[in-house]
Amino acid sequence: MPSTHNVDKPWDTGDIDKWKIEPFKPEDNLGGTFAEESSFALTFPKYRELYLKEAWPFITRSLEKIGIGCSLDLIEGMMKVSTTRKTYDPAAILKARDLVKLLARSVPAPQAIKILEDGMAADVIKIRSLVRNKERFVKRRQRILGPNGSTLKALELLTQTYILVQGNTVAAMGPYKGLKEVRRVVADCMANIHPIYHIKELMIKQELAKDPSLANESWDRFLPKFKKRNLPNRRTPFKVTDKNKKPYTPFPPPQEKSKVDLQMESGEFFLSKHAKEAEKRHAKEAEKKEKKAKKEMERAADFVPPKERVAPR
């Protein structure tokens, strides 16, 4: 059979965008209505109840356009989306699932509705389990926001995504390529790598993408290489213990003396309150005198004349 690889294709012109996602219309669904109903239910926190109650009519109207039914249960604290007889797009229920997930993570309704558009995706990144210490976690989460939200805004502009840092998660929505970059930046930030390094890298990549001559070349020579300046992780122990093998004894080691036992041995335990205070005062005064004498000696050292050389006869 002759090869058709090099055959002329008059319909394949250069102005065709092969990556463009064509909208799915009702006439494209040749199978008709779905045989079974698919549904997703998701709980939401208590503080989102009032906002969702106000915004639910707007959400219902938006989902009706793609043939998805929805319900809000304020008693159980649950949102539910399901397919109906009017649903024609098989992927619509998955987009509706992402919509309720974003609404539960405090994303505003006008912004969350954009997930129903083609080419938009959502990603909820769980960051609390990445850092054990709570104080360190709060500090690193603040790095994603930056001063007055400047770092977050820069990330949104460079990745063409919408990012919301809320509680123990980071909710992002946008194109798939941008979501991949956001996940990498957030994971590295929780691993103590500052987002500013990734922002610099993304800015350079954005400028290099404008040059068509570099399309098929490696960009490694243009990207910055940051050296790790961390000190070695090996911790020096405060007390160096003797690791030599000692002879086996069945008896346990003698019990260490408590603070009260040591005070009784020194006689401090039997002193009155005034005597203890007087003793502390005397110890402080003696320490002050010692420091004063040391300082006077240091000052006097500047006025000590140097030894003169004896001239040879």
Image: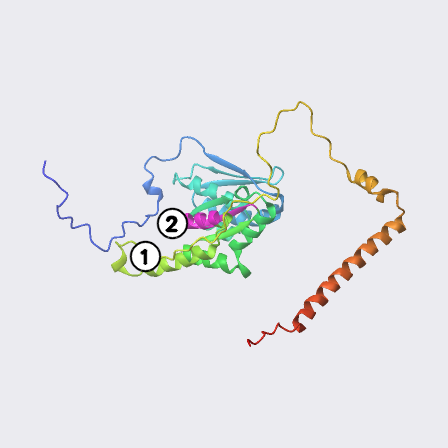
Looking at the image, the residue that sits furthest to the front is: 313
Secondary structure of the residue carrying numbered label 1 = loop
Which amino acid type corresponds to the residue marked 1 in the rendered image?
Answer: Arg
The residue depicted at 40 percent of the width and 40 percent of the height is 91
Looking at the image, the residue that sits furthest to the left is: 2
Query: What secondary structure do most residues of the magenta stretch adopt?
Result: helix
Residue 159 visible in the picture: yes
Which amino acid type corresponds to the residue marked 2 in the rendered image?
Answer: Lys
Q: Quadrant of residue 292?
A: bottom right
| Dot 2 or dot 1, earlier in sequence | 2
Judging depth in this view, the residue of 184 and 77 nearest the camera is: 184
Q: Position of residue 275 (x, y in %)?
A: 88, 50
Q: Is residue 172 magenta?
A: yes
Position of residue 17 in the picture relative to residue 146 (left or right): left
Say which mark, if any, is on residue 177: 2
Q: Provide the residue span drawn in magenta.
A: 168-188
Q: Split into 4 quadrants, where in the image is the N terminus?
A: top left
Judging depth in this view, the residue of 217 and 75 nearest the camera is: 217
Q: Split into 4 quadrants, where in the image is the C terminus?
A: bottom right
Question: Could you give the CA–CA distance between mark 2 and mark 1, rounded to whole angstroms?
Answer: 22 Å
Q: Position of residue 45 (x, y in %)?
A: 60, 43
Q: Position of residue 291 (x, y in %)?
A: 73, 61
- Write down the residue under mark 1: 221
Residue 118 visible in the picture: no
Judging depth in this view, the residue of 128 and 226 nearest the camera is: 226
Say which mark, if any, is on residue 72: none
Q: Mark 2 packing: few (<14 Cα in 10 Å), some, or many (20+)?
A: few
Position of residue 49 in the picture relative to residue 65 (left or right): right
The residue depicted at 86 percent of the width and 54 percent of the height is 278
Judging depth in this view, the residue of 293 and 112 nearest the camera is: 293
